[in-house]
């Protein structure tokens, strides 16, 4: 059968692929949630959900510096990658030896599309549909703030980096009633200075738990720049993991927003 991935690349499989290597932590979680953990032969060191997946599957390295030799030795039927999280040149090299399915996700719709496609590909359509519906219902039931809250979302420090409008995080935040004050800044993950923060004056600053592990001391650092802003540490998985985790974002946001 022929399958087209989210980048338009067509792969051919003689039958339903069974043995999987996944190089995308959020998709690893989704695959396990639809019952495919026994079929996962390889994962990355950042695939932390479910907790035991790095014991039941071989760790092939990180998302950027995985070992092609380890992956080939596992003889997978399919490798699942992501256009942003994995390095293009490495993916092209892997494709010389193995079928590589590349996801491309910058909106919630693309996340749901990924779940639908992979559920169908692996014969887990009903399980995937259940998660998709739960996600759609969670966002539909969310009550938007009376007016958009001007927010800055940070993913990195030294330099501070935020999110541009062509990112999954931006799309999720916008759906939850936040105005990304750095949406129009150049680049997908623009570098932000103290002067930028003072100029934009967001009423809310969200410090993500990943990829940079922001902590309490960083709240104080931002408070020195924006003494009147509300500054929060937030679970980055709810806003940046485009698999099962995103369904938690509305309830999680409502909890801290009303807290």
Image (cartoon, rainbow, N blue to C red):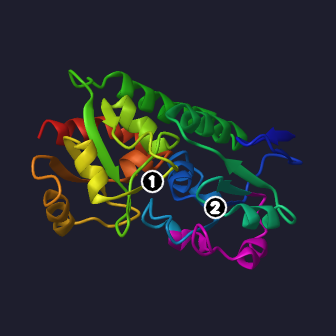
Q: Position of residue 24 (x, y in %)?
A: 58, 58
**Mark 1–mark 2 distance (CA, rounded to whole Å):** 20 Å
Residue at figure coordinates x 27%, y 24% from the top left:
144
Q: Nearer the viewer, residue 56 or 202?
A: 202
Reading the image, the residue beneath label 1 is 190
Residue at figure coordinates x 61%, y 69% from the top left:
64
Residue at figure coordinates x 31%, y 51% from the top left:
196
Q: Is residue 46 above or below residue 254?
A: below
Q: Position of residue 187 (x, y in %)?
A: 52, 50
Q: Quadrant of the rendered structure where residue 76 is?
A: bottom right
Quadrant in which the N terminus is drawn: top right
Q: Is residue 61 above or below residue 256?
A: below
101 with respect to 60 (left or right) = right
**Front disc: 1 or 2:** 1
Q: Is residue 67 magenta?
A: yes
Q: Could you tell me if residue 43 is visible in this image?
A: yes
Please state the extent of the stretch shown in magenta in the rendering. Answer: 54-78
């Amino acid at each position: 059968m022929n399958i087209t991935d989210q980048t338009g690349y067509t792969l051919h499989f003689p039958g339903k692929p069974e043995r999987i290597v996944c190089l995308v932590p959020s998709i690893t979680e989704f695959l396990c949630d639809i019952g495919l953990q026994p079929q996962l032969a390889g994962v990355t060191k950042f695939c932390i959900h479910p907790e035991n997946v790095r014991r039941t599957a071989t760790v092939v390295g990180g998302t950027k510096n995985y070992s092609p030799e380890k992956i080939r030795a596992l003889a997978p039927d399919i490798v699942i990658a992501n256009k942003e999280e994995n390095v293009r040149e490495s993916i092209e090299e892997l494709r010389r030896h193995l079928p590589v399915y590349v996801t491309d996700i910058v909106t919630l719709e693309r996340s749901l599309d990924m779940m639908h496609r992979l559920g169908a590909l692996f014969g887990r359509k009903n399980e995937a549909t259940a998660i998709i519906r739960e996600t759609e219902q969670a966002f539909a039931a969310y009550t938007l703030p009376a007016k958009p809250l001007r927010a800055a979302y940070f993913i990195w420090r030294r330099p501070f980096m935020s999110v541009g409008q062509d990112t999954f995080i931006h799309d999720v935040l916008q759906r939850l009633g936040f105005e990304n004050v750095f949406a129009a800044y150049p680049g997908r993950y623009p570098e932000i200075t103290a002067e930028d923060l003072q100029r934009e004056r967001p009423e809310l600053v969200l410090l993500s738990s990943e990829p940079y592990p922001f902590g309490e001391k960083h709240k104080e650092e931002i408070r020195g720049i924006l003494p009147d802003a509300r500054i929060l540490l937030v679970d980055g998985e709810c806003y940046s993991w485009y698999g099962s985790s995103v369904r938690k974002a509305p309830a999680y946001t409502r909890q801290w927003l009303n807290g």
